[in-house]
Image: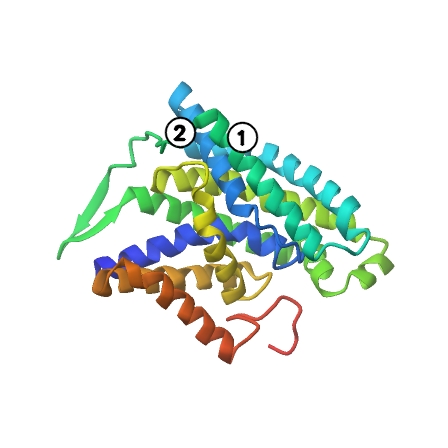
Amino acid sequence: MNALVTGILLGGFYAALAIGLSIAFGLLDIVNIAHPAFIILGAFVAFIFNSQFGLDPILVSVIFAPVFFLIGVLIYKVYYASFEKTGAEALRGLAFFFGVMFIIEVLLIIYFGVDFQMVQADYIDFKLTFGGGVDLPFRMLVPFVIAMIMTLGLQYFSSKTFFGKAMQAVAQDPVALRLMAIDPARIKRIAFGISLATCSIAGALFVIVMPIEPSIGRLYIGIVFAIVVLGGLGSQTGTLIGAMLLGLVESLITTFFGPSWSPAVAFGALILVLAFKPTGILGRVGDTRG
């Protein structure tokens, strides 16, 4: 039971890390390899204001989400003018985001060094224990709840609002979008800003769950891309389902067979799912083939 509870909570945490990438990679076809680095940047922002002023890390992340949005808009402008507009976004765009990732890491190392940092909050060390010895640590529960709110909110936004439907239209048929007198580049610019705004909140959740250091984001590059592909490109609900599956598999394997097996089995499960359903669990947004 503890393994199942931990797996569900871990899945919610993974969903928070991957939900922004489901927009950038799933809907916009932008291979933002620097996504986890922006999450760690958000984590360090939360750490600074928590350690210096005692502010709650989640509150700090919400305050700075518009700043991350503006950073995302500026980065997409550079990306569009340098690569997408010229049709050279595939390999060169990937190299561009590799460069962004290393710049973020180097700046964080220069300022903070390589030591692990933690935040303080009243709820971090609190836990509920139920009959049978099942623990519910708030260190994981709070990120799980915030991740659910983020995921369901973005799902509602993308499916019920005009701009959300425009984001899906960019993924399906940008030419038709132009015929509707809507600029796809503008839609993608704002959508990429939203994807980076989620990094601010995900970063706060990250530093609540575990200590951080500047290069730790590299360990999660494969995980977040695997979740987005597993759930179905562009689907926020699929991202949540994929994160839950990955979290459950990782927790169960770690509990019964040891932590060294969990990455291999988790990504093995990804390969099996994609072998039978290449479009992911819920399929790619706009793919009528299912």
**Mark closer to the chain start, 1 or 2:** 2
Give the quarter of the figure containing the C terminus. bottom right
Q: Residue at x 41, y 42 (%)?
A: 206
Q: Amino acid at mark 1?
A: Leu
Instruction: Determine crowd level at label 2: few under 14, some 14-19, many 20+ residues with C-alpha closer than 10 A.
Output: some
Q: Secondary structure at mark 1?
A: helix
Most extreme residue toward the top is: 53
Residue 73 appears left or right of 143: right
Q: State the quadrant of the N terminus.
A: bottom left
Report, in whole angstroms, how far the alpha carbon at label 1 lies from the one at label 2.
Answer: 24 Å
The picture places residue 227, in percent across and down from the top left corner, at 48, 60
Q: Residue at x 41, y 19 (%)?
A: 52
Crowding around mark 1 (Cα neighbors within 10 Å: few <14, some 14 to 19, many 20+) is: few
Of residue 232 and residue 37, the one placed in the foreground of this image is: 37
Is 225 on the left-hand or right-hand side of 66? Answer: left
- Read off the residue under disc 2: 56
Q: Position of residue 69 (x, y in %)?
A: 62, 38
- The image quadrant of residue 131 is bottom left
The residue under label 1 is: 107
Number of labels in the image equals 2
